[in-house]
Amino acid sequence: MSIDKETAAKVAKLARIKVEDEDLPALASEFNAVLGFIEQLGEVDVTGVEPMVSVTPMRLKRREDVVTDGGQQEKVLSNAPDAREGFFAVPKVVE
Amino acid sequence: MLDLTYDAPEPKVIAGAKHDWELVIGMEVHAQVSSKAKLFSGASTQFGAEPNSNVAFVDAAMPGMLPVINEFCVEQAVRTGLGLKAQIHLKSAFDRKNYFYPDLPQGYQISQLYEPIVGEGEILVDMEPGIARKVRIERIHLEQDAGKSIHDMDPNMSFVDLNRTGVALMEIVSRPDIRGPEEAAAYVVKLRQILRYLGTCDGNMQNGNLRADVNVSVCRPGAYEKYMETQDFSHLGTRCEIKNMNSMRFIQAAIDFEARRQIRILEEGGEIVQETRLYDPDKGETRSMRSKEEAHDYRYFPCPDLLPLELEQAWVDDIAAHLPELPDEKKARFMADYGLTEYDASVLTAETASAAFFEKAADGRDGKLAANWVINELFGRLRKDGDKDITESPVSPEQLGKVIDLIKSDTISGKIAKELFEIVYTEGGDPEEIVEARGMKQVTDTGAIEAALDEIIAANPAQVEKAKENPKLAGWFVGQVMKATGGKANPKAVNELVQKKLG
Protein backbone atom coordinates (compact mmCIF):
# COMPACT_ATOMS: atom_id res chain seq x y z
CA MET A 1 0.00 0.00 0.00
CA SER A 2 1.34 3.36 -0.98
CA ILE A 3 0.07 6.75 0.12
CA ASP A 4 0.29 9.48 -2.48
CA LYS A 5 0.07 13.23 -2.00
CA GLU A 6 -3.69 13.30 -2.70
CA THR A 7 -4.44 10.64 -0.11
CA ALA A 8 -2.32 12.48 2.45
CA ALA A 9 -4.30 15.66 1.70
CA LYS A 10 -7.58 13.79 2.12
CA VAL A 11 -6.56 12.28 5.45
CA ALA A 12 -5.50 15.70 6.69
CA LYS A 13 -8.79 17.19 5.62
CA LEU A 14 -10.83 14.45 7.34
CA ALA A 15 -8.85 15.06 10.53
CA ARG A 16 -9.37 18.82 10.13
CA ILE A 17 -5.63 19.44 10.24
CA LYS A 18 -4.31 22.13 7.94
CA VAL A 19 -1.29 20.98 5.96
CA GLU A 20 0.43 23.28 3.46
CA ASP A 21 0.74 21.91 -0.04
CA GLU A 22 4.56 21.80 0.07
CA ASP A 23 4.44 19.70 3.27
CA LEU A 24 2.26 16.97 1.75
CA PRO A 25 4.99 14.84 0.10
CA ALA A 26 6.85 14.58 3.41
CA LEU A 27 3.64 13.67 5.22
CA ALA A 28 2.83 11.02 2.61
CA SER A 29 6.27 9.49 3.03
CA GLU A 30 5.85 9.40 6.83
CA PHE A 31 2.51 7.60 6.37
CA ASN A 32 4.23 5.10 4.11
CA ALA A 33 6.92 4.43 6.71
CA VAL A 34 4.27 3.75 9.39
CA LEU A 35 2.21 1.55 7.09
CA GLY A 36 5.32 -0.28 5.98
CA PHE A 37 6.04 -1.20 9.58
CA ILE A 38 2.48 -2.36 10.12
CA GLU A 39 2.58 -4.43 6.94
CA GLN A 40 5.44 -6.42 8.46
CA LEU A 41 2.99 -7.57 11.12
CA GLY A 42 0.85 -8.94 8.31
CA GLU A 43 3.52 -11.57 7.71
CA VAL A 44 2.70 -13.28 11.01
CA ASP A 45 0.31 -16.22 10.61
CA VAL A 46 -2.60 -15.59 12.98
CA THR A 47 -5.01 -18.21 11.67
CA GLY A 48 -7.20 -19.38 14.50
CA VAL A 49 -5.96 -16.73 16.91
CA GLU A 50 -8.72 -14.71 18.55
CA PRO A 51 -7.96 -10.94 18.27
CA MET A 52 -6.80 -9.63 21.65
CA VAL A 53 -8.76 -6.63 22.82
CA SER A 54 -7.24 -6.20 26.26
CA VAL A 55 -4.24 -7.36 28.24
CA THR A 56 -6.21 -7.64 31.48
CA PRO A 57 -8.71 -10.46 31.91
CA MET A 58 -11.57 -8.08 32.66
CA ARG A 59 -15.26 -7.97 31.85
CA LEU A 60 -16.73 -4.70 30.52
CA LYS A 61 -17.62 -2.60 33.55
CA ARG A 62 -21.30 -1.66 33.81
CA ARG A 63 -23.33 1.03 35.50
CA GLU A 64 -26.85 0.97 36.92
CA ASP A 65 -29.49 3.14 35.27
CA VAL A 66 -29.35 5.90 37.88
CA VAL A 67 -28.85 9.63 37.36
CA THR A 68 -25.63 10.47 39.18
CA ASP A 69 -24.25 13.32 37.11
CA GLY A 70 -25.15 16.60 35.40
CA GLY A 71 -26.54 19.87 36.77
CA GLN A 72 -23.26 21.66 36.11
CA GLN A 73 -24.02 23.93 33.18
CA GLU A 74 -21.53 26.55 34.29
CA LYS A 75 -18.64 24.08 34.56
CA VAL A 76 -19.52 22.44 31.24
CA LEU A 77 -19.47 25.81 29.49
CA SER A 78 -16.47 27.24 31.36
CA ASN A 79 -13.89 26.30 28.68
CA ALA A 80 -16.02 27.39 25.74
CA PRO A 81 -14.59 30.27 23.70
CA ASP A 82 -18.15 31.61 23.45
CA ALA A 83 -21.27 30.64 25.38
CA ARG A 84 -24.62 32.44 25.48
CA GLU A 85 -27.82 31.78 27.37
CA GLY A 86 -26.62 28.37 28.50
CA PHE A 87 -25.59 27.26 25.00
CA PHE A 88 -22.23 26.82 23.33
CA ALA A 89 -22.13 29.49 20.63
CA VAL A 90 -20.30 28.45 17.45
CA PRO A 91 -19.94 29.94 13.97
CA LYS A 92 -23.13 29.28 12.00
CA VAL A 93 -23.40 25.74 10.62
CA VAL A 94 -26.47 25.17 8.51
CA GLU A 95 -27.17 22.22 6.26
CA MET B 1 -54.17 -19.04 19.80
CA LEU B 2 -55.55 -18.10 16.42
CA ASP B 3 -53.02 -18.60 13.68
CA LEU B 4 -53.48 -15.76 11.21
CA THR B 5 -52.26 -16.04 7.67
CA TYR B 6 -51.69 -13.06 5.47
CA ASP B 7 -51.29 -12.28 1.81
CA ALA B 8 -48.50 -9.93 0.80
CA PRO B 9 -49.66 -6.55 -0.53
CA GLU B 10 -49.14 -5.64 -4.19
CA PRO B 11 -46.03 -3.48 -4.66
CA LYS B 12 -46.68 0.14 -5.57
CA VAL B 13 -46.28 0.74 -9.30
CA ILE B 14 -45.50 4.20 -10.65
CA ALA B 15 -46.11 4.78 -14.33
CA GLY B 16 -43.24 6.69 -15.90
CA ALA B 17 -43.35 8.45 -19.26
CA LYS B 18 -41.99 5.31 -20.94
CA HIS B 19 -42.89 2.36 -18.72
CA ASP B 20 -43.86 1.13 -15.26
CA TRP B 21 -41.54 1.22 -12.26
CA GLU B 22 -41.56 -0.41 -8.82
CA LEU B 23 -40.10 0.89 -5.56
CA VAL B 24 -37.65 -0.84 -3.26
CA ILE B 25 -37.28 0.65 0.21
CA GLY B 26 -35.14 -0.13 3.23
CA MET B 27 -35.33 1.76 6.51
CA GLU B 28 -32.97 2.70 9.31
CA VAL B 29 -34.95 3.78 12.32
CA HIS B 30 -33.24 5.53 15.23
CA ALA B 31 -35.19 4.86 18.40
CA GLN B 32 -34.20 6.56 21.63
CA VAL B 33 -33.87 3.97 24.40
CA SER B 34 -36.18 4.61 27.36
CA SER B 35 -33.78 4.95 30.30
CA LYS B 36 -33.14 7.37 33.14
CA ALA B 37 -29.43 7.90 32.44
CA LYS B 38 -27.36 8.09 29.26
CA LEU B 39 -25.62 5.18 27.50
CA PHE B 40 -22.14 5.91 28.85
CA SER B 41 -22.65 8.52 31.57
CA GLY B 42 -24.77 9.17 34.66
CA ALA B 43 -26.41 12.32 33.23
CA SER B 44 -30.21 12.43 32.89
CA THR B 45 -32.03 11.77 29.61
CA GLN B 46 -34.94 14.06 30.59
CA PHE B 47 -36.30 16.00 27.60
CA GLY B 48 -36.76 19.78 27.78
CA ALA B 49 -34.28 20.54 30.56
CA GLU B 50 -32.23 23.77 30.80
CA PRO B 51 -29.62 23.67 27.98
CA ASN B 52 -26.39 21.84 28.87
CA SER B 53 -27.66 20.91 32.34
CA ASN B 54 -27.94 17.16 31.62
CA VAL B 55 -24.28 16.91 30.71
CA ALA B 56 -21.56 14.87 32.41
CA PHE B 57 -17.92 15.55 31.59
CA VAL B 58 -17.91 12.31 29.56
CA ASP B 59 -20.67 13.72 27.35
CA ALA B 60 -18.75 16.98 26.90
CA ALA B 61 -15.68 14.88 25.96
CA MET B 62 -13.47 16.41 28.62
CA PRO B 63 -9.93 14.95 28.48
CA GLY B 64 -9.42 11.80 30.51
CA MET B 65 -13.10 10.98 30.93
CA LEU B 66 -14.02 7.37 30.13
CA PRO B 67 -17.35 5.85 29.13
CA VAL B 68 -19.01 3.24 31.41
CA ILE B 69 -21.95 1.42 29.87
CA ASN B 70 -25.47 1.62 31.33
CA GLU B 71 -26.57 -1.98 31.84
CA PHE B 72 -30.26 -1.14 31.51
CA CYS B 73 -29.73 0.31 28.01
CA VAL B 74 -28.16 -3.02 27.03
CA GLU B 75 -31.16 -4.84 28.51
CA GLN B 76 -33.54 -2.60 26.54
CA ALA B 77 -31.72 -3.36 23.27
CA VAL B 78 -31.88 -7.09 24.02
CA ARG B 79 -35.59 -6.81 24.88
CA THR B 80 -36.20 -5.00 21.58
CA GLY B 81 -34.33 -7.72 19.71
CA LEU B 82 -36.38 -10.45 21.38
CA GLY B 83 -39.59 -8.53 20.57
CA LEU B 84 -38.58 -8.52 16.90
CA LYS B 85 -37.89 -12.29 17.05
CA ALA B 86 -34.23 -11.55 16.38
CA GLN B 87 -30.97 -13.27 17.21
CA ILE B 88 -29.22 -11.84 20.27
CA HIS B 89 -25.45 -11.74 19.93
CA LEU B 90 -23.89 -12.75 23.24
CA LYS B 91 -20.77 -10.94 22.16
CA SER B 92 -20.86 -7.51 20.56
CA ALA B 93 -18.41 -4.62 20.40
CA PHE B 94 -18.27 -0.85 20.08
CA ASP B 95 -16.62 1.14 17.31
CA ARG B 96 -15.87 4.78 16.73
CA LYS B 97 -17.49 6.54 13.80
CA ASN B 98 -15.37 9.62 13.19
CA TYR B 99 -16.71 12.95 11.94
CA PHE B 100 -16.67 16.58 12.96
CA TYR B 101 -19.75 18.54 13.90
CA PRO B 102 -20.29 21.09 16.69
CA ASP B 103 -22.91 18.92 18.44
CA LEU B 104 -20.50 15.96 18.64
CA PRO B 105 -17.83 17.02 21.15
CA GLN B 106 -15.89 13.73 21.02
CA GLY B 107 -15.30 14.03 17.28
CA TYR B 108 -16.68 10.51 16.99
CA GLN B 109 -19.87 8.65 17.78
CA ILE B 110 -19.58 5.39 19.71
CA SER B 111 -21.57 2.88 17.67
CA GLN B 112 -21.50 -0.81 16.73
CA LEU B 113 -20.51 -1.32 13.10
CA TYR B 114 -18.77 -4.67 13.02
CA GLU B 115 -20.44 -6.62 15.82
CA PRO B 116 -23.98 -5.36 16.61
CA ILE B 117 -25.82 -6.57 19.70
CA VAL B 118 -28.85 -7.85 17.73
CA GLY B 119 -28.90 -9.75 14.42
CA GLU B 120 -31.64 -10.86 12.04
CA GLY B 121 -35.30 -10.58 12.98
CA GLU B 122 -38.62 -9.65 11.37
CA ILE B 123 -41.66 -7.40 11.59
CA LEU B 124 -45.10 -8.20 10.22
CA VAL B 125 -46.40 -4.93 8.79
CA ASP B 126 -50.20 -4.88 8.72
CA MET B 127 -51.71 -3.07 5.74
CA GLU B 128 -55.38 -4.06 5.98
CA PRO B 129 -57.27 -7.10 7.31
CA GLY B 130 -55.70 -10.22 5.77
CA ILE B 131 -52.89 -8.26 4.07
CA ALA B 132 -49.47 -7.81 5.64
CA ARG B 133 -45.84 -7.49 4.58
CA LYS B 134 -43.15 -9.45 6.36
CA VAL B 135 -40.13 -7.14 6.58
CA ARG B 136 -36.80 -8.66 7.54
CA ILE B 137 -34.68 -6.87 10.13
CA GLU B 138 -30.98 -6.98 9.34
CA ARG B 139 -29.59 -5.79 12.67
CA ILE B 140 -30.00 -3.51 15.67
CA HIS B 141 -27.06 -1.73 17.20
CA LEU B 142 -26.58 0.55 20.19
CA GLU B 143 -25.06 3.99 19.70
CA GLN B 144 -24.84 7.49 21.15
CA ASP B 145 -27.12 10.29 20.07
CA ALA B 146 -25.60 13.66 19.13
CA GLY B 147 -26.47 17.03 20.67
CA LYS B 148 -28.80 19.61 19.26
CA SER B 149 -27.83 22.65 17.19
CA ILE B 150 -30.16 25.60 17.07
CA HIS B 151 -29.70 27.88 14.11
CA ASP B 152 -32.40 30.50 14.52
CA MET B 153 -31.44 32.20 17.79
CA ASP B 154 -28.71 34.38 16.31
CA PRO B 155 -28.02 35.59 12.75
CA ASN B 156 -24.32 34.66 12.81
CA MET B 157 -24.03 31.89 15.39
CA SER B 158 -25.37 28.41 15.94
CA PHE B 159 -26.21 27.46 19.52
CA VAL B 160 -25.34 23.99 20.78
CA ASP B 161 -27.08 22.09 23.57
CA LEU B 162 -25.41 18.83 24.66
CA ASN B 163 -28.32 17.51 26.76
CA ARG B 164 -29.10 14.84 24.15
CA THR B 165 -25.41 14.04 23.57
CA GLY B 166 -24.74 10.47 24.65
CA VAL B 167 -28.36 9.41 25.11
CA ALA B 168 -28.71 5.76 24.01
CA LEU B 169 -30.16 5.06 20.57
CA MET B 170 -31.07 1.78 18.93
CA GLU B 171 -30.55 1.85 15.19
CA ILE B 172 -32.95 -0.68 13.72
CA VAL B 173 -31.99 -1.57 10.16
CA SER B 174 -34.42 -3.33 7.80
CA ARG B 175 -33.73 -5.26 4.61
CA PRO B 176 -35.05 -3.66 1.39
CA ASP B 177 -38.38 -5.47 1.76
CA ILE B 178 -40.71 -2.45 1.76
CA ARG B 179 -42.44 -1.84 -1.56
CA GLY B 180 -44.24 1.51 -1.37
CA PRO B 181 -44.69 4.77 0.56
CA GLU B 182 -47.75 3.47 2.47
CA GLU B 183 -45.87 0.32 3.48
CA ALA B 184 -42.97 2.47 4.70
CA ALA B 185 -45.28 4.49 6.94
CA ALA B 186 -47.05 1.31 8.12
CA TYR B 187 -43.63 -0.19 8.94
CA VAL B 188 -42.80 2.74 11.21
CA VAL B 189 -46.27 2.55 12.80
CA LYS B 190 -45.85 -1.16 13.56
CA LEU B 191 -42.27 -0.81 14.80
CA ARG B 192 -43.32 2.07 17.04
CA GLN B 193 -46.22 0.00 18.38
CA ILE B 194 -43.92 -2.92 19.25
CA LEU B 195 -41.36 -0.61 20.92
CA ARG B 196 -44.13 0.98 23.00
CA TYR B 197 -45.50 -2.43 24.01
CA LEU B 198 -41.98 -3.46 25.06
CA GLY B 199 -41.42 -0.16 26.88
CA THR B 200 -38.02 0.22 25.20
CA CYS B 201 -38.78 3.53 23.39
CA ASP B 202 -41.65 5.95 23.95
CA GLY B 203 -41.99 6.50 20.19
CA ASN B 204 -42.46 10.25 20.55
CA MET B 205 -41.72 11.41 17.02
CA GLN B 206 -42.32 15.08 17.72
CA ASN B 207 -39.47 15.15 20.24
CA GLY B 208 -37.32 13.23 17.76
CA ASN B 209 -37.28 10.07 19.90
CA LEU B 210 -38.07 8.04 16.79
CA ARG B 211 -36.66 9.14 13.44
CA ALA B 212 -36.21 7.33 10.16
CA ASP B 213 -33.65 7.32 7.35
CA VAL B 214 -35.17 5.88 4.20
CA ASN B 215 -33.24 4.19 1.38
CA VAL B 216 -35.15 4.41 -1.89
CA SER B 217 -34.43 2.89 -5.29
CA VAL B 218 -36.57 2.06 -8.30
CA CYS B 219 -36.54 -0.94 -10.62
CA ARG B 220 -38.50 -2.41 -13.51
CA PRO B 221 -41.23 -4.95 -12.64
CA GLY B 222 -39.72 -8.42 -12.19
CA ALA B 223 -36.30 -7.22 -11.03
CA TYR B 224 -37.17 -7.34 -7.34
CA GLU B 225 -38.25 -10.98 -7.58
CA LYS B 226 -34.82 -11.80 -9.06
CA TYR B 227 -33.17 -10.03 -6.12
CA MET B 228 -35.29 -11.99 -3.61
CA GLU B 229 -34.33 -15.27 -5.27
CA THR B 230 -30.60 -14.56 -5.31
CA GLN B 231 -30.17 -11.78 -2.68
CA ASP B 232 -27.98 -10.20 -5.35
CA PHE B 233 -28.31 -6.41 -5.12
CA SER B 234 -27.21 -5.91 -8.73
CA HIS B 235 -30.79 -6.65 -9.78
CA LEU B 236 -31.89 -3.51 -7.94
CA GLY B 237 -31.39 0.14 -8.84
CA THR B 238 -28.95 2.55 -7.19
CA ARG B 239 -30.39 3.89 -3.95
CA CYS B 240 -30.50 7.29 -2.33
CA GLU B 241 -30.83 7.79 1.40
CA ILE B 242 -33.27 10.39 2.71
CA LYS B 243 -32.15 11.42 6.19
CA ASN B 244 -33.85 12.07 9.46
CA MET B 245 -37.62 12.13 9.04
CA ASN B 246 -39.93 12.25 12.04
CA SER B 247 -43.43 12.19 10.56
CA MET B 248 -45.36 9.45 8.77
CA ARG B 249 -46.71 12.01 6.31
CA PHE B 250 -43.25 13.32 5.41
CA ILE B 251 -41.91 9.79 5.00
CA GLN B 252 -44.58 9.01 2.42
CA ALA B 253 -44.26 12.33 0.60
CA ALA B 254 -40.45 12.11 0.52
CA ILE B 255 -40.46 8.56 -0.89
CA ASP B 256 -42.99 9.47 -3.54
CA PHE B 257 -41.01 12.53 -4.62
CA GLU B 258 -37.69 10.68 -4.58
CA ALA B 259 -39.01 7.72 -6.62
CA ARG B 260 -40.41 10.06 -9.29
CA ARG B 261 -37.14 12.02 -9.38
CA GLN B 262 -35.17 8.82 -9.97
CA ILE B 263 -37.63 7.59 -12.63
CA ARG B 264 -37.35 10.87 -14.53
CA ILE B 265 -33.54 10.69 -14.51
CA LEU B 266 -33.51 7.06 -15.66
CA GLU B 267 -36.06 7.57 -18.40
CA GLU B 268 -34.04 10.52 -19.72
CA GLY B 269 -31.08 8.15 -20.01
CA GLY B 270 -29.29 9.42 -16.91
CA GLU B 271 -27.81 7.55 -13.96
CA ILE B 272 -28.67 7.69 -10.26
CA VAL B 273 -25.81 8.82 -8.06
CA GLN B 274 -25.79 7.12 -4.67
CA GLU B 275 -26.04 9.99 -2.17
CA THR B 276 -27.61 11.31 1.00
CA ARG B 277 -30.59 13.61 0.52
CA LEU B 278 -32.68 15.77 2.77
CA TYR B 279 -36.45 16.17 2.54
CA ASP B 280 -37.73 19.74 2.59
CA PRO B 281 -41.35 19.60 3.80
CA ASP B 282 -42.02 23.22 2.78
CA LYS B 283 -41.05 22.64 -0.84
CA GLY B 284 -42.12 18.96 -0.86
CA GLU B 285 -38.85 17.85 -2.45
CA THR B 286 -35.60 16.10 -1.60
CA ARG B 287 -32.23 17.71 -2.21
CA SER B 288 -28.65 16.55 -2.06
CA MET B 289 -26.65 16.99 1.17
CA ARG B 290 -23.32 17.54 -0.52
CA SER B 291 -21.47 18.42 2.65
CA LYS B 292 -22.36 15.00 4.04
CA GLU B 293 -20.87 13.31 0.96
CA GLU B 294 -17.47 14.89 1.43
CA ALA B 295 -17.20 13.69 4.99
CA HIS B 296 -18.64 10.28 4.27
CA ASP B 297 -15.40 8.54 5.13
CA TYR B 298 -16.08 7.73 8.78
CA ARG B 299 -12.83 5.77 9.36
CA TYR B 300 -14.48 3.35 11.78
CA PHE B 301 -12.25 1.49 14.21
CA PRO B 302 -12.87 -0.48 17.43
CA CYS B 303 -13.34 1.85 20.40
CA PRO B 304 -10.24 1.44 22.58
CA ASP B 305 -12.14 2.72 25.66
CA LEU B 306 -14.60 -0.17 25.77
CA LEU B 307 -14.11 -3.91 26.10
CA PRO B 308 -16.43 -6.16 24.10
CA LEU B 309 -19.93 -6.49 25.54
CA GLU B 310 -20.45 -10.07 26.66
CA LEU B 311 -23.86 -11.34 27.78
CA GLU B 312 -24.90 -14.48 29.63
CA GLN B 313 -27.46 -16.67 27.87
CA ALA B 314 -29.34 -17.06 31.19
CA TRP B 315 -29.66 -13.28 31.49
CA VAL B 316 -31.08 -13.07 27.96
CA ASP B 317 -33.44 -15.98 28.70
CA ASP B 318 -34.71 -14.19 31.77
CA ILE B 319 -35.58 -11.09 29.71
CA ALA B 320 -37.28 -13.34 27.15
CA ALA B 321 -39.33 -15.01 29.88
CA HIS B 322 -40.67 -11.66 31.02
CA LEU B 323 -41.57 -10.16 27.64
CA PRO B 324 -45.06 -8.65 27.58
CA GLU B 325 -47.75 -9.90 25.20
CA LEU B 326 -46.93 -8.29 21.84
CA PRO B 327 -49.34 -6.68 19.35
CA ASP B 328 -49.68 -9.65 16.96
CA GLU B 329 -50.37 -12.10 19.81
CA LYS B 330 -52.79 -9.75 21.52
CA LYS B 331 -54.69 -9.15 18.30
CA ALA B 332 -54.98 -12.88 17.61
CA ARG B 333 -56.15 -13.49 21.17
CA PHE B 334 -58.79 -10.75 20.95
CA MET B 335 -60.11 -12.33 17.75
CA ALA B 336 -60.15 -15.82 19.24
CA ASP B 337 -61.42 -15.03 22.75
CA TYR B 338 -63.85 -12.19 22.06
CA GLY B 339 -64.89 -13.08 18.52
CA LEU B 340 -63.73 -9.71 17.18
CA THR B 341 -63.05 -8.90 13.55
CA GLU B 342 -59.42 -8.35 12.62
CA TYR B 343 -60.17 -4.67 12.08
CA ASP B 344 -61.69 -4.18 15.54
CA ALA B 345 -58.91 -6.20 17.16
CA SER B 346 -56.30 -4.02 15.39
CA VAL B 347 -57.94 -0.81 16.54
CA LEU B 348 -58.15 -1.99 20.14
CA THR B 349 -54.58 -3.29 20.28
CA ALA B 350 -52.98 -0.21 18.68
CA GLU B 351 -52.03 0.96 22.17
CA THR B 352 -51.68 -1.16 25.31
CA ALA B 353 -53.83 1.33 27.23
CA SER B 354 -56.83 0.91 24.92
CA ALA B 355 -56.40 -2.88 24.89
CA ALA B 356 -56.37 -2.95 28.69
CA PHE B 357 -59.43 -0.68 28.85
CA PHE B 358 -61.32 -2.96 26.48
CA GLU B 359 -60.39 -6.11 28.39
CA LYS B 360 -61.72 -4.66 31.63
CA ALA B 361 -64.91 -3.39 30.00
CA ALA B 362 -65.44 -6.73 28.23
CA ASP B 363 -64.68 -8.87 31.28
CA GLY B 364 -67.46 -11.46 31.58
CA ARG B 365 -69.52 -9.68 28.91
CA ASP B 366 -70.32 -9.82 25.20
CA GLY B 367 -66.94 -8.99 23.63
CA LYS B 368 -68.31 -7.74 20.33
CA LEU B 369 -70.76 -5.41 22.05
CA ALA B 370 -68.00 -4.13 24.33
CA ALA B 371 -65.71 -3.59 21.31
CA ASN B 372 -68.43 -1.59 19.54
CA TRP B 373 -68.92 0.61 22.56
CA VAL B 374 -65.22 1.23 23.09
CA ILE B 375 -64.46 1.88 19.40
CA ASN B 376 -67.57 3.73 18.24
CA GLU B 377 -68.90 5.50 21.30
CA LEU B 378 -65.93 6.00 23.59
CA PHE B 379 -63.21 6.64 20.98
CA GLY B 380 -65.64 8.83 19.02
CA ARG B 381 -66.50 10.86 22.12
CA LEU B 382 -62.85 11.25 23.13
CA ARG B 383 -62.02 12.49 19.64
CA LYS B 384 -64.78 15.12 19.86
CA ASP B 385 -63.46 16.09 23.29
CA GLY B 386 -60.25 17.65 21.98
CA ASP B 387 -58.71 14.34 20.82
CA LYS B 388 -58.29 13.02 24.35
CA ASP B 389 -56.23 9.91 24.98
CA ILE B 390 -57.86 6.76 26.37
CA THR B 391 -55.88 7.28 29.60
CA GLU B 392 -57.76 10.57 30.08
CA SER B 393 -61.20 9.03 29.58
CA PRO B 394 -63.71 10.31 32.14
CA VAL B 395 -65.60 7.00 31.73
CA SER B 396 -63.94 4.05 33.46
CA PRO B 397 -64.04 0.53 32.01
CA GLU B 398 -66.21 -0.48 34.97
CA GLN B 399 -68.75 2.25 34.18
CA LEU B 400 -68.83 1.32 30.50
CA GLY B 401 -69.21 -2.34 31.50
CA LYS B 402 -72.28 -1.47 33.54
CA VAL B 403 -73.83 0.41 30.61
CA ILE B 404 -73.29 -2.72 28.52
CA ASP B 405 -74.87 -4.87 31.26
CA LEU B 406 -77.95 -2.62 31.28
CA ILE B 407 -78.32 -3.04 27.51
CA LYS B 408 -77.81 -6.80 27.72
CA SER B 409 -80.43 -7.22 30.45
CA ASP B 410 -82.92 -5.21 28.35
CA THR B 411 -83.13 -2.65 31.17
CA ILE B 412 -82.42 0.17 28.72
CA SER B 413 -82.76 0.47 24.96
CA GLY B 414 -79.81 1.12 22.67
CA LYS B 415 -80.95 4.71 22.15
CA ILE B 416 -81.28 5.38 25.88
CA ALA B 417 -77.89 3.73 26.39
CA LYS B 418 -76.29 6.46 24.28
CA GLU B 419 -77.96 9.11 26.42
CA LEU B 420 -76.83 7.30 29.55
CA PHE B 421 -73.27 7.12 28.20
CA GLU B 422 -73.28 10.87 27.60
CA ILE B 423 -74.43 11.48 31.20
CA VAL B 424 -71.74 9.18 32.58
CA TYR B 425 -69.16 10.89 30.34
CA THR B 426 -70.04 14.44 31.33
CA GLU B 427 -71.36 14.06 34.88
CA GLY B 428 -69.91 10.76 36.07
CA GLY B 429 -71.76 8.47 38.47
CA ASP B 430 -72.95 4.89 38.66
CA PRO B 431 -74.87 3.95 35.48
CA GLU B 432 -77.35 1.73 37.38
CA GLU B 433 -78.19 4.48 39.85
CA ILE B 434 -78.55 7.06 37.07
CA VAL B 435 -81.00 4.82 35.20
CA GLU B 436 -82.97 4.27 38.39
CA ALA B 437 -82.95 7.89 39.55
CA ARG B 438 -83.82 9.41 36.18
CA GLY B 439 -86.44 6.87 35.17
CA MET B 440 -84.56 5.75 32.09
CA LYS B 441 -85.61 2.14 32.32
CA GLN B 442 -87.07 0.60 29.25
CA VAL B 443 -90.83 -0.02 29.36
CA THR B 444 -91.30 -3.73 28.73
CA ASP B 445 -94.68 -3.73 30.42
CA THR B 446 -96.86 -4.52 27.38
CA GLY B 447 -99.92 -3.11 29.17
CA ALA B 448 -98.42 0.38 29.26
CA ILE B 449 -97.21 0.12 25.66
CA GLU B 450 -100.60 -1.18 24.54
CA ALA B 451 -102.38 1.71 26.25
CA ALA B 452 -100.15 4.22 24.46
CA LEU B 453 -100.64 2.44 21.13
CA ASP B 454 -104.45 2.28 21.56
CA GLU B 455 -104.51 6.00 22.18
CA ILE B 456 -102.55 6.69 19.00
CA ILE B 457 -104.76 4.35 16.94
CA ALA B 458 -107.90 6.04 18.26
CA ALA B 459 -106.56 9.50 17.47
CA ASN B 460 -105.44 8.65 13.91
CA PRO B 461 -108.12 6.64 12.09
CA ALA B 462 -106.92 7.78 8.66
CA GLN B 463 -103.37 6.52 9.30
CA VAL B 464 -104.80 3.20 10.49
CA GLU B 465 -106.65 2.73 7.19
CA LYS B 466 -103.53 3.51 5.17
CA ALA B 467 -101.39 1.19 7.25
CA LYS B 468 -103.80 -1.67 6.80
CA GLU B 469 -103.51 -1.30 3.01
CA ASN B 470 -99.77 -0.80 3.07
CA PRO B 471 -98.09 -2.65 5.98
CA LYS B 472 -94.88 -0.67 5.39
CA LEU B 473 -96.55 2.35 6.98
CA ALA B 474 -96.80 0.52 10.32
CA GLY B 475 -93.41 2.00 11.16
CA TRP B 476 -95.11 5.34 11.73
CA PHE B 477 -97.01 3.85 14.68
CA VAL B 478 -93.87 2.39 16.15
CA GLY B 479 -92.29 5.84 16.00
CA GLN B 480 -95.30 7.45 17.65
CA VAL B 481 -95.29 4.95 20.52
CA MET B 482 -91.58 5.51 21.09
CA LYS B 483 -92.20 9.25 21.15
CA ALA B 484 -95.10 8.89 23.57
CA THR B 485 -92.99 6.81 25.96
CA GLY B 486 -89.99 9.12 25.78
CA GLY B 487 -88.00 6.51 23.88
CA LYS B 488 -88.15 4.11 26.78
CA ALA B 489 -90.48 1.52 25.24
CA ASN B 490 -88.82 -1.72 24.27
CA PRO B 491 -88.72 -1.47 20.45
CA LYS B 492 -89.22 -5.20 20.01
CA ALA B 493 -92.38 -5.21 22.18
CA VAL B 494 -93.74 -2.17 20.32
CA ASN B 495 -93.16 -3.80 16.94
CA GLU B 496 -94.93 -6.95 17.99
CA LEU B 497 -97.95 -5.05 19.31
CA VAL B 498 -98.24 -2.85 16.22
CA GLN B 499 -98.10 -5.97 14.03
CA LYS B 500 -100.83 -7.59 16.09
CA LYS B 501 -103.16 -4.59 16.10
CA LEU B 502 -102.77 -3.53 12.48
CA GLY B 503 -101.77 -6.70 10.76
Image (tube, rainbow, N blue to C red):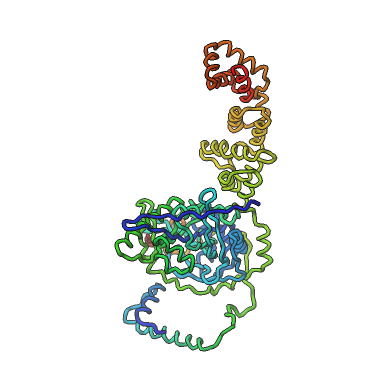
**Where is the C terminus of chain B found, in terms of image quarters?**
top right
- Residue B64 visible somewhere in the drawing: no
Tell me where residue B408 sits by quadrant.
top right
Figure disc tally: 0
Q: Which residue is painted at 61% across and 23% down in the image?
A: B495
> Camera-side residue: B484 or B470?
B470
Residue A90 on image: x %, y %: 40, 62
Q: Eyeballing the image, is B392 above or below B300?
A: above
Residue B246 on image: x %, y %: 46, 54
Q: Eyeballing the image, is B483 above or below B394?
A: above
> Camera-side residue: B480 or B415?
B480
Q: Which residue is painted at 35% across and 65% down in the image?
A: B272
- Residue B329 visible somewhere in the drawing: yes
Horizontal placement of B353 versus B283: left or right?
right
Residue B409 on image: x %, y %: 68, 30
Residue B180 on image: x %, y %: 44, 55
Tell me where residue B23 sits by quadrant.
bottom left
